[in-house]
Image: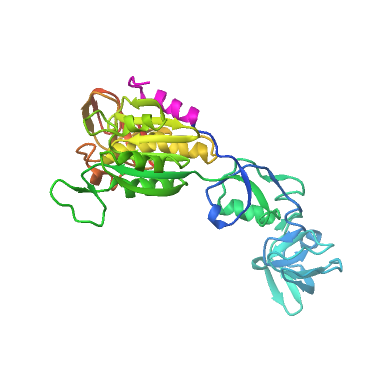
Amino acid sequence: MTSMLDVAAAREIVLRHAKPLAARAEPLSPDVLGQVLAEDVVADIDSPPFDKSMMDGYAVRSADCASPGVLLKVVGELAAGAFLPTPVGPGEAVRIFTGAQFPPGADAVLKQEDTTVEGEVVRVQKPVKPGTNIFRRGSEMRVGEVVVPKGTVITPVALGLLAAAGRLSAKLQRHPVPRVGILATGNELVNAEETPTVGQIRNTNGPMLEALVIRAGAEVYPCGIASDDARLEGHLKDVLYEDMAIISGGVSVGKYDLVPDVLKSLGVETHFHTVRMKPGKPLLFGTIEDTLVFGLPGNPVSAAVGFELFVRPAIDIMCGRSNPGPKELRVPLSEPLSAKHDRPTYHPAVVGPDSVRPLPWQGSADLRSLLPANGYIVLPPGEVRFAAGEVVSVIQSG
């Protein structure tokens, strides 16, 4: 397929070919943050496993505390981890601390701020109702209840719940993250630590794409720089071994844009090669067996936009996440914006909670314009003039 597609159609093709990686059972640890569970996790015990105090104060019978001024005899003390088997009787109170198991006989916790201590008795300053400040057994989770469902992204909170369910050290089915090979192409490129000579530029796309892949939750396999000559085939063979391959540069139609033909010779099926968008019109997507192959433009803003629109959603799917990004939002402009483009255009912008601010931008090679950006304004083709306060479509960077 070589005809130019619009963004929606191209995205649909990418998502149709992206599949979650096969789940595998492995122990969990904090380094799996961002991965997705592939099984339901049920609680092995009630949580909390007993009625417990939510406050420092006194375990009391609410009937004894119906009016201010009542004196109660303090008959014991309960810290977290302790238990008092003797029931609390009429006119009695037990000093209790947050997290302690609630004693029998009592039905409320009187906050310590609502009391005054007078020797071995405590004076009630405010009435208390039954059940006040008690976290009841099983109110968070019941034994056998699904507490972390299949499809949950593993977050610090999810790890805490897995610990509460007794499954943190168990082997759980989860989707691994894809391993992504990244290759920059171009005779003019040198490594970032080198000083360019005549006609050379530093490789900015490699480090930028590596960081974008890591931020998207995948694993990076850097493949360096390939020149636009006969050695390109060997470099492309290397990057195609991964779950996903990203090649930047060499995908247009110039004399030295060799990537599409070499990919074809290696067995890559190209599903599209151009997209009706700006920046980033020459954008290739193909597959070889289970490997997804993206050929992004060499201009850095084009590569960044292409990543957000097509690569990041594919990573989301491969990781097992639902609702892959980016999502278009409707946000008012903070200032006027005029533009004229022959294609739908993704203009760098700062997207705030209540408005969006367009950034000065000199085109697809202007990487510096992206430094403060956290998204893009989606401009329709043709000449447009928006006043401050008008609502426009935006996407946010991942």
Q: Nearer the viewer, residue 275 or 159?
A: 275
Vertically, is 77 above or below 375? below
- Magenta-highlighted stretch: main secondary structure? helix
> Is residue 255 visible to us here?
yes
Measuring from the top left, give residue 64's x and y in whole percent.
Answer: 80, 63
Q: Nearer the viewer, residue 211 or 190?
A: 190
Quadrant of residue 337 within the rendered picture: top left
Q: Is residue 223 above or below residue 6?
A: below
Identify the image quadrant of the C terminus. top left
Nearer to us in this view, 236 or 12: 236
Q: Is residue 300 left or right of residue 96?
A: left
Count of numbered circles in the view = 0
Q: Residue 78's x, y, as percent?
A: 75, 71
Tell me: 83 left or right of 348. right
Q: Position of residue 178 (x, y in %)?
A: 49, 43
Residue 99: percent from the left, percent from the top? 70, 64
**Name of the residue lying farthest toward the bottom:** 119
Q: Is residue 355 magenta?
A: no
**Along the line of sight, which residue is nearer the eye, 388 or 315?**
315
User: Is residue 356 shown to the viewer in this render?
Assistant: no
Instruction: Choose top left, top right, bottom left or bottom right for residue 117.
Output: bottom right
**In the rendered image, which quarter is residue 325 located in?**
top left
In the rendered image, the quadrant that contains the N terminus is top left
Q: Specify start and end residues of the magenta stretch as a single range.
A: 1-17
Q: Name the residue at the front extreme.
A: 230
**Which residue is found at the position 34% from the left and 21% from the top?**
2
